[in-house]
Image (spheres, rainbow, N blue to C red):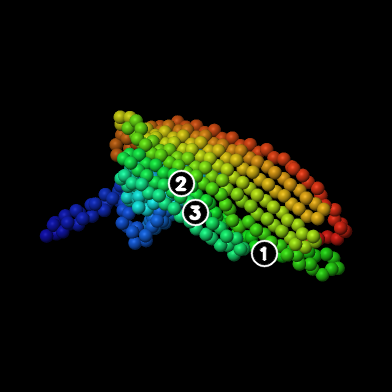
Amino acid sequence: MKKAAFLWVFLVMTPAWAAEEQGISVYPASFFADARPATANDMIARLPGFSLDNGLSSTRGFAGSAGNILIDGARPTAKNDDLFTILGRIPAANVERIELIRGGAPGIDMQGQSVLANVIRKKQDANQTILNANLGFMGSGQWAPYGGIEYHGQSGAWRYEASLTRVTQQWDDSPGEGYRVILAPGQAPVYDRAVYTGIIRTGWQAHGGLVAPLWGGEWNNNFTLQTTDYPSTLRYYGYGGSRFDTITRLKTAEFGSHWQGGWGAVNLETLVLQRLGHQEDSNTSLAPGSSSAFFSNKDTGETIGRVTARYSFSPRSQRRSGRGGRLQFPRWPFKLEHQRPAGLADQRQPVGE
């Protein structure tokens, strides 16, 4: 009787031990159904014991900027296009399951992460168009319309997507109305009304992607174009009025291409990533008897290429060899358009703010 009980416990517990040894927990789409997720982003937010790491797009190279998300077993070939945005473009209806991979899983490149989430999409022919429109209102009295249109399609091993989005975000919560106090010796304090605006960041984003079979493997391509404006204005109303305007305009372009397939017992992986950026800064000021303007622009770029070969000697032993290269260039030309200093009405009076 004792032997039978021991055998029963062993048979019941063995699958659990095997799953723990493999280091992979599988969550089917039905696990998230009660939360009614709209995108894969909503599903990831409800994944037990997992916190999304977007990675660092500012880090040089590709390996050091990795987040903790895989899409169909591969890391997205993108840096400007962050994981939060990528997951937001995957409809929840297209997700078959999400695998939670821990560091002990054999044969998995953890890319420096202790835990990875692998989003597995359904392999079925489908076409889907998503249109969303939103309107936000800020306490400062600003209206913020935003939205976009997306298309997702799949036919056999081919998968394609395209989207156009109007981006509107609250990027600075410091704007509002206030005052400054001007103190002069022997005089009563003067309160000057001040208004700071620039709470909203606006722009456009266009994205396209194509996954196709190639040479017995899978070829994944994507591109992203984005423009973003960061405007802000500080205005004082006393002493004839003055204002200080700052505008930063960013334009970025990114193309990524990733191929993974096999050559006998060797798993091959290649990737190419090209990033281009252009930034324009404008700083102007206007006051009675004084005006100035300063303009600058900066061009940046990064090109990454990498080839990796993996060979498994056993389920627990794997050898990897790779070659990669990176080219990065910055350029910061600037010019001073115009500057005219103002004369003080009485330079003997100190003014404190």
Q: Residue furthest bottom?
A: 188
Mark 1 against mark 3, which lies toward the viewer?
3
> Left or right of 348: which side holds 327?
left
Q: Secondary structure at mark 1?
A: strand
- The image shows residue 172 at horizontal and vertical percentages of 60, 57
Any part of residue 154 in sight? yes
In the rendered structure, are the residues bearing label 2 and label 1 in contact, judged by CB atoms less than 8 Å apart? no
Q: Which residue is mark 1?
A: 177
Which label sits on residue 163?
Answer: 2
Q: Residue furthest left?
A: 1
Is 330 situated above or below 88? above
Q: Nearer the viewer, residue 294 or 111?
A: 294
- The image shows residue 138 at horizontal and vertical percentages of 58, 62
In which quadrant is the C terminus drawn?
Answer: bottom right
Q: Nearer the viewer, residue 3 or 175?
A: 175
Residue at (76, 48) in percent of width and height? 292
Any part of residue 59 in sight? no
Which label sits on residue 147?
Answer: 3
Residue at (76, 57) in percent of width and height? 242
Q: Secondary structure at mark 3?
A: strand
Q: CA distance from mark 1 to mark 3?
A: 29 Å
In which quadrant is the N terminus drawn?
Answer: bottom left
Mark 3 neighbour density, 10 Å: few (under 14) some (14–19) many (20 or more): some
Q: How many numbered discs sit on the rendered protein?
A: 3
Quarter holding residue 141: bottom right
Q: Secondary structure at mark 2?
A: strand
Residue at (37, 61) in percent of width and height? 35
Which label sits on residue 168?
Answer: none
- The image shows residue 262 at horizontal and vertical percentages of 33, 32
Quarter holding residue 186: bottom right
Q: Amino acid at mark 1?
A: Glu
Is 181 situated above or below 4? below
